[in-house]
Image: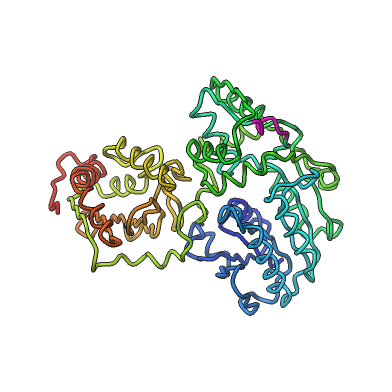
Amino acid sequence: MKILLTGANGYIGMRLIPFLLEAGHELVCTVRDKNRLAVNPRTRSKISIVEIDFLEEPNPDLLPQDIDAAYYLIHSMTSSTVDFDEKEKRAAENFNIYLSKTRCEQVIYLSGIVNDEKLSKHLNSRKQVEDTLYQGNFNLTVLRAAIIVGSGSSSFEIIRDLCEKLPLMITPKWVKTRCQPIAIRNVIQYLTGVLGNKSCYNDSFDIGGPDVLTYKQMMLLYSKIRGLSLSILDVPVMSPKLSSYWLYFVTSTSYKLALNLVDSMRVEVITCDTRLQEMLHIKPINYTDAIKLAFEKIEQNQVVSSWKDSLVSGRFRKDLNHYIKVPEYGCLKDRQSIKLKNPEQALENIWSIGGKRGWYYANTLWKIRGFIDKLWGGVGLRRGRTHSNELYEGDSLDFWRVLLADKEERRLLLFAEMRVPGEAWLDWEIDDDNILHQTATFRPRGLWGRLYWFSMLPFHYFIFGGMIRNIARYEPKATAISNS
C-alpha cells in the first residue's frame, strides 16, 4: 500500500516508520521542514518526503493522487494555550481538502479518550478533530488513547523527571485522577492492526492497558521499579497555573504543554470498550512492564524517538534552513582551533556532547545558564538528547537545535534555542589537516545584544577554550593554534 504519514517527525510518527517499511508499504511522509526528519540515510532513501504545513492554505497538487491510506498524527497542543483548538480544527479541514484529490480509502487518527462528561479543552479539541475528519471522503478509523508509556514519550519523560529528581512531592489534587496508561508497543500494534481492516472503517475505538491507576499510583510504581524513595503529599490548594509552573521548572516540558496537560489531568481517561483488543488479539502490557520495557530501550541506547526533538519543544517555528548559513557580518565570534592527533576520537567526542556527557568543561556553569534560561521562559538543559552518540538534523540537544550533523564532512552545527538578545550558533569542523575548528557566533539584537556578549566574554574565554581542549583531551600533546 502507498501510505501517507502526517506528523512523521513526531513521537508516534517516528515509531511507525520502521514498522510500515518492514511490512513492505510505500511511505509518503509530510513534515513542515524536510531537514528535520531525523532518520538515518538508509531509511530516508526508502521514503518520499513532502513539505506541507496543514495550517497554511492547502495546495492538493503537492500530494500524489495514488495514496491508499493515511495516518493523521497532527496536533497543536504545544504551540499555544489559547487557540490551539482552532489551529487543530483548521489543520483537519485542510487535511480533508488535500485528501479529496487522492484515492485514499482509509484514514487512521490517534486521538484521546473522551468518555468523561466534562472534557478539558485539549480533549474537546481532539473530539472536534475527529468530527471534522469524519466529514472527509474517506473511511475513518479513530483510536482513542490515554497516557502513552514508552521511552521518549512526553508522559513517560515527565513522570521520569519528577520521580528521579524529587524524593518528596507536594502535589495538587489532580494526582488522584484515574487514567488508563497504554504501552507504546500496544499503540503501534493497534495502529498497524487496523490498517486496511474494513471492519474498523468509520468507527472509533478506545485503546488502553490493563491497569486503571491514579497519577499518584503511577509515580509511586515508577519509583518502586527504579528503587527510588518517594513520598507524595497532595494538597487541594494548588491552582492549575501554579501546577503548570511546577511541571515546567521540574521537568523538561514547555510551559504551554504543561498548562494544557494539567488541564487534561483533571479529567478521567478510562476506556469503555475492549472491542478492538479482541478483534486484533492484542495482549495488553501492564504499566509495570511498560516502564521496564522503556528502560531496556534507554539502557541499550535504542530510543527511536522523543517528543523533545519536536520543533515545538523549542522556541522557534521557522524552517531550520533559515539559520543553517552562519552569518559573517554584524556578528561577534569566538574562534578556537587545535591540532588533533586522534581525529576519529575527537569526532566521537563532538557527536557525544551534551546530555549526560555534558559540555566537557565548566558543566556547573552550563547548568546555571540552563536554570537561568528556564527562569526566563526558555527550554533550559532538561531536554538532554535522544541518543547518546548519534545526532541528526533537527534533534534537540539541551538548549540547542542541531542544524547540520555530517560525520563524513566532520562538521556539527548547532543553533541556540535559549533566550538571548540575538541569535547564536556553535560550530565544530575538522579540516583535511586534522585541525579542529570551533566557532561560537553571536548576531546581537540591538544594544542589549552587544552588552550581553561583552558581559559574557570572561566566561567565553575559558569555557570555550577548555571545551575544545577536552574534546581533544585524548591527545596528550595536542597544541593550541589560535585563541581569539
In which quadrant will I find the N terminus? bottom right
Labels in figure, total: 0
Q: Is the stretch drawn in magenta largely helix, strand or loop?
A: helix
Mark yes or no: residue 305 visible: no
Give x and y (percent) for residue 212.
Answer: 75, 32
Q: Nearer the viewer, residue 153 or 249?
A: 249
- Image-quadrant location for residue 332: bottom left
- Seen at 47% across and 53% down, the residue is 314
- Image-quadrant location for residue 146: top right
Q: Nearer the viewer, residue 193 or 308?
A: 308
Find out whether residue 270 is within the magenta segment.
no
From the viewer's perspective, is 26 left or right of 79? Answer: right
Give x and y (percent) for residue 82.
Answer: 60, 55
In which quadrant will I find the C terminus? bottom left
Give x and y (percent) for residue 428.
Answer: 28, 55
Mark yes or no: residue 419 visible: yes
Give x and y (percent) for residue 309.
Answer: 50, 51
- Seen at 66% across and 42% down, the residue is 148
- Seen at 57% across and 52% down, the residue is 78
Image: magenta residue range: 173-178
Residue that protrudes farthest toward the bottom in the picture: 61
